[in-house]
Image (cartoon, grey):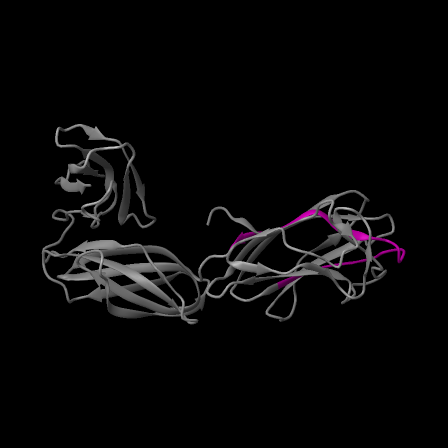
Amino acid sequence: MASFAQVATYTFTSSDPGNQTSKAVTSKDANITASDITRGAGISPVTTISSINSSDWNSSTQNATDYYEFTLTPNTGYQLNLTGLNLTERRSNTGPTTYLIAYSIAGGSETTVSTGPLSGTVDAALNISLSIQTAQSIRFRIYAWGATSNSGTFRLNNSLTVTGAAPLPVKLIGFSGQSIDNSAVLNWSTGWEVRNAGFDILRSSTISNFEKVGFVKGSVSTQEVSVYSFTDPNVQNGQVYYYRLKQNNEDGSSELSNIIAVRIRSDMSLSTAIPVVYPNPNQGSFSLSTQGLDITKVSLYNAGGVEIPITVNTTKDSSTLTIEVTAPIASGLYILRFQTADGAHQPAVKVLIK
């Protein structure tokens, strides 16, 4: 993933007096739950508008009860991929001089992600990079110590934000198929897996009614790339088959992949490959299975030879192009033409748009 959204944000406003017992989450990802920010038993609430503020921080060393904490929990069937923790803090003149931020997963031991000095008496930002993947609850604690007076304070204000994502527990990064030796050979890979039981292989000859034709066991839980393959020999020469994956989690939940098309040809090679349009007929939005061809240009024409404006997007593994007609057009038969990287023009494909 190139960019990440806010997983959870706590925004402090004038309705937060500072001495409140807790601070509820302001916004969060729909696939998680987020606890309130609360204090440890060793510190005391202090009134300061638009914050959560505390005194009685330990003077010399980290104290196990002097902290702010909150917990994020992914919903069943999801995981947390956390990339950052950003907050604004402020101390008083006699407040703590050192902080430490740590997390623990599912009540386990703590892992420190940042520690350092606290100085000055103005708002200061702490921006911490994270690289955490978990399908379990994760608790963050913000410790502070080094106060020179029991009345010295340390507060969180403005906002505290955790960035990242809460995706499904399997990231599919490629799914393609081709005809080899009169069989359909499917290949796919995942970027990570959490409690992945495996994949049902679903097939259809009509793109609407899929049946299970096989199963491939998953890697269960891994943060590494996993590569899979499945060969379907029960196919007929000349027939187009549509495939999709049903990824099954150990908790019983599941997720369907995109659909790919494979044309079975006993003599299939790149010189004889013919891309497949699906669904066909369609309403101006359809996919083109490249059948292994390196297609660099796609054009759509009406029966009179007039080019129709379209947008073309490519999947990560380049096995499928998604095509969208960008202007209103009449129902009818259209011609899809394409060009490969070597400059060759391949046979045209008929597309029926309703």
> Which residue is depicted at the point 30% across and 67% down?
200
Q: Give the x, y percent position of residue 237.
A: 9, 59
Q: In the rendered view, tell whether residue 226 sits above or below residue 351.
A: below
Q: Give the x, y percent position of residue 7.
A: 56, 53
Q: In the rendered view, tell whether residue 231 sits above or below residue 238.
A: below
Decide which of 337, 205 is in the foreground and name it: 205
Q: In the rendered view, tell whether residue 295 sits above or below residue 180.
A: above
Q: How many marks?
A: 0
Decide which of 317, 55 is in the foreground and name it: 55
Q: Is residue 99 magenta?
A: no
**Left/right of residue 240 with respect to residue 169 in the rendered view:** left
Where is residue 216, by image quadrant? bottom left
Q: Is residue 152 magenta?
A: yes
Question: Which residues fall within the magenta stretch?
Answer: 139-165
Q: Give the x, y percent position of residue 17.
A: 78, 50
**Left/right of residue 308 with respect to residue 151 in the rendered view:** left
**Left/right of residue 206 with respect to residue 86 in the rendered view:** left
The C terminus sits in image quarter:
top left
Q: Give the x, y percent position of residue 280.
A: 18, 47
Determine the main secondary structure of the stretch shown in magenta.
Answer: strand
**Left/right of residue 291 with respect to residue 16 in the rendered view:** left
Q: Is residue 141 visible?
A: no
Where is residue 73, by image quadrant? bottom right
Q: Is residue 129 visible?
A: yes
Decide which of 242, 103 is in the foreground and name it: 242
